[in-house]
Structures are given as C-alpha cells and as structure tokens.
C-alpha cells in the first residue's frame, strides 16, 4: 500500500531537516579525505532534494506499521 500524500507532506519537513543534518555531518567526515565541507545552506538545499525519497520511504514504513497494528 502506498502512503497518502497527506502523510508524506506532514513528514517532509522532518525528513528535510534530518537529511540536511546528515549531509552536513557526512561532509565533515568527508573532509578527512580532503573533500570540501558543505556550508549549512548547501546542506539545506541538498536536504530539500534527498529529503523527498527518504520521507517517502519512511512513510511507507509507517503505513506498514499501521497495517500490522490493524491486523493484530
């Protein structure tokens, strides 16, 4: 079952924030390899992009949990 657009829209701001923070900290770890560190605004922009698929995956997980709770 696919998640409703309302569920994805409600979770999207949290997904964007989580992905932006993860992207920023990943760039800090990448600096150990000589890669550039992303600015917070670059990380936020990246979070907007990669936040949607991450939010959709998490919403699918939530729907599976709700279905499991309904059957028990």
Image: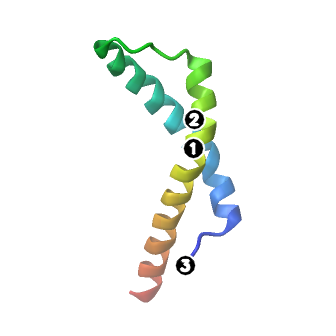
> Disc 2 on helix, strand or loop?
helix
Looking at the rendered structure, which numbered label has been put on residue 51? 1
- Number of callouts: 3
Q: In this image, 63 relative to 4: left or right?
A: left
The reply to whether callout 1 and callout 2 are in contact (CB within 8 Å) is yes
Q: Is residue 66 left or right of residue 14?
A: left
Question: Where on the picture, by quarter, is residue 22?
Answer: top left
Disc 1 on helix, strand or loop?
Answer: helix
Please say if 51 is above or below 28: below
- Residue at 49% x, 58% y is 58
* 13 vs 47, nearest the viewer: 47
The residue under the point 46% across, 30% down is 23
Whether tag 3 and tag 2 are in contact, CB under 8 A, the answer is no
Whole-angstrom CA distance, mark 3 to mark 2, is 26 Å
Crowding at label 2, few (<14), some or many (≥20) Cα neighbours within 10 Å?
many
The image shows residue 26 at horizontal and vertical percentages of 39, 26
Labels 3 and 1: the sequence-earlier one? 3
| Distance of label 1 from label 2 (alpha carbons) | 5 Å
Q: Which residue is mark 3?
A: 1
Relative vertical location of residue 67 with respect to residue 43 in this rendering, above or below: below
The residue closer to the viewer here, 35 or 44, is: 35
Q: Earlier in the sequence, mark 3 or mark 2?
A: 3
Q: Residues within 10 Å of mark 3 (few under 14, many from 20)?
A: few
Residue lying at the far bottom in this picture: please name it: 71
């Amino acid at each position: 079952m696919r998640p409703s657009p309302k569920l994805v829209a409600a979770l999207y701001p949290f997904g964007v924030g989580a992905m932006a923070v993860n992207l920023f900290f990943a760039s800090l770890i990448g600096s150990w390899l000589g890669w550039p560190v992303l600015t917070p605004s670059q990380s936020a922009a990246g979070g907007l992009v990669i936040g949607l698929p991450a939010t959709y995956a998490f919403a699918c997980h939530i729907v599976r949990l709700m279905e499991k709770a309904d059957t028990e």
